[in-house]
């Protein structure tokens, strides 16, 4: 891959005057061994060394083969050979693709991504930034390999590994290399839908349509009122899809249910609910998961419950 040379100064001007016929010498760093520069990015035709400016002091396009010369030494002289400056260890210019490239849809798998930006990069460098479209949601910690290079971890908030759902399916994700791993910029996603929940602890199986909304990592559920005949001292609603379940070992939040009927009696403030990481809304009455009466009608009045998906 070729990089176009740029002068380390804004222009070869001295005392307000240009340098007609100025001479640009390119060397290996710390030496006077010339390197080859080129007339086009195809690197097919080399410049004569030194490169000569025109009558206005303007140099032609000069390209450096960055795969061969990551740094170089530049001497600028007048047409008479008087040294104007000598700059050593100049880096080849970083291409736009190296600092912020669109890599299209990620390849590999959900947890082991591969990115193929165009043009490809030849090495990782601190500050490189890539954007890509995720093909599927991750289910655990995530790694990435860019342009076939070594695999690197993707983290958040420094070195914290990603957890399931941090990269949703179909999201545009931005990652930046910090010298060790790629850090992901927060992905704020929204999703809305419904699922069919099934009551347990009832004589006859009951189902209910639950609406949900996801904004970032916050999940909000709307559960409608429904009653069923009790045959157990426990009460749950199963069936939450994986995409909205808590991803850690802890339950997703805990909130009181404003009104709940137990054994045919409407109670206020005695029942609470949490979402487990297996997709079960688990209810407790008076502080106990087995605190319900195993007879009569039981079930919640309509309520809204919100929790953080990856809190634990």
Image (cartoon, rainbow, N blue to C red):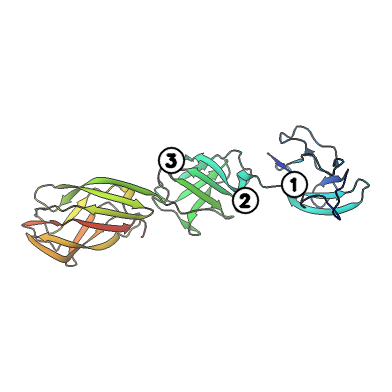
**With respect to residue 48, does 254 lie above or below?**
below
Q: Residue furthest top?
A: 44
Question: Where does residue 220 sit, x and y in percent of width and height?
Answer: 29, 55
Count neighbours of disc 1 (C-alpha within 10 A) and say few if under 14, some if 14 to 19, many if 20 or more.
Answer: some
Q: Which mark is residue 127?
A: none
> Is 153 displayed left or right of 9 in the figure?
left
| Quarter of the image where the N terminus is located | top right
Question: Where does residue 267 sit, x and y in percent of width and height?
Answer: 12, 64
> Is 182 displayed left or right of 54 in the figure?
left
Q: Which mark is residue 6?
A: 1
Which circle's residue, 3 or 2, is located before the other in the chain? Answer: 2
**With respect to residue 41, does 206 lie above or below?**
below
Q: What residue sits right under mark 3 in the picture?
A: 135
| Quarter of the image where the C terminus is located | bottom left
Question: Where does residue 187 sit, x and y in percent of width and height?
Answer: 44, 51
- Secondary structure of the residue carrying numbered label 1: loop
Mark 3 near mark 1, Cβ–Cβ under 8 Å? no
Q: Residue at x 43, y 48 (%)?
A: 167
Count neighbours of disc 3 (C-alpha within 10 A) and say few if under 14, some if 14 to 19, many if 20 or more.
Answer: some
Q: Residue at x 50, y 49 (%)?
A: 174
Which circle's residue, 1 or 2, is located before the other in the chain? Answer: 1
Question: Where does residue 272 sit, x and y in percent of width and height?
Answer: 21, 63
- In this view, the residue in front, 8 or 283, is 8
Q: Residue furthest front?
A: 16
Q: Is residue 289 visible?
A: no
> Is 22 displayed left or right of 307 in the figure?
right
Mark 3 near mark 2, Cβ–Cβ under 8 Å? no
- In this view, the residue in front, 234 or 183, is 183
Q: What's the CA distance linking mark 3 and mark 1?
A: 39 Å
User: Nearer the observer, disc 3 or disc 1?
Assistant: 1
Which circle's residue, 3 or 1, is located before the other in the chain? Answer: 1
Q: What residue sits right under mark 2 in the picture?
A: 125
């Amino acid at each position: 891959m070729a990089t176009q040379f740029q002068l380390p100064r804004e222009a070869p001007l001295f005392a307000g005057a240009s340098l007609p016929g100025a001479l640009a010498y390119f060397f290996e760093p710390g030496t006077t061994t010339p390197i080859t520069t080129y007339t086009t990015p195809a690197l097919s035709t080399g410049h004569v060394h030194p490169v000569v400016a025109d009558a206005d002091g303007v140099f032609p396009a000069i390209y450096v083969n960055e795969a061969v010369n990551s740094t170089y030494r530049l001497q600028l002289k007048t047409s008479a050979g008087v040294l104007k400056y000598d700059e050593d260890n100049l880096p080849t210019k970083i291409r736009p693709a190296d600092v912020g490239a669109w890599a299209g849809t990620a390849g590999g798998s959900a947890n082991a991504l591969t990115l193929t930006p165009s043009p490809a990069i030849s090495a990782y460098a601190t500050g490189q930034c890539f954007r890509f479209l995720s093909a599927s949601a991750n289910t655990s910690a995530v790694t990435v390999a860019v342009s076939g290079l070594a695999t690197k971890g993707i983290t958040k908030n420094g070195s914290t590994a990603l957890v399931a759902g941090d990269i949703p399916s179909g999201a545009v994700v931005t990652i930046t290399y910090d010298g060790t791993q790629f850090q992901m910029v927060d992905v704020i996603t929204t999703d809305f839908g419904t699922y069919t929940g099934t009551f347990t602890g009832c004589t006859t199986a009951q189902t209910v349509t639950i609406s949900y909304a996801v904004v970032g990592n916050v999940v909000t559920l709307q559960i409608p009122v429904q009653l069923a005949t009790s045959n157990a001292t426990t009460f749950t609603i199963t069936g939450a899809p994986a995409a909205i379940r808590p991803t850690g070992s802890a339950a997703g939040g805990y909130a009181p249910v404003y009104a709940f009927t137990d054994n045919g009696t409407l109670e206020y403030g005695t029942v609470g609910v949490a979402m487990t990481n297996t997709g079960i809304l688990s209810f407790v009455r008076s502080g106990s998961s087995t605190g319900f009466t195993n007879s009569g009608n039981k079930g919640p009045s309509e309520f809204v419950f919100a929790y953080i998906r990856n809190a634990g």
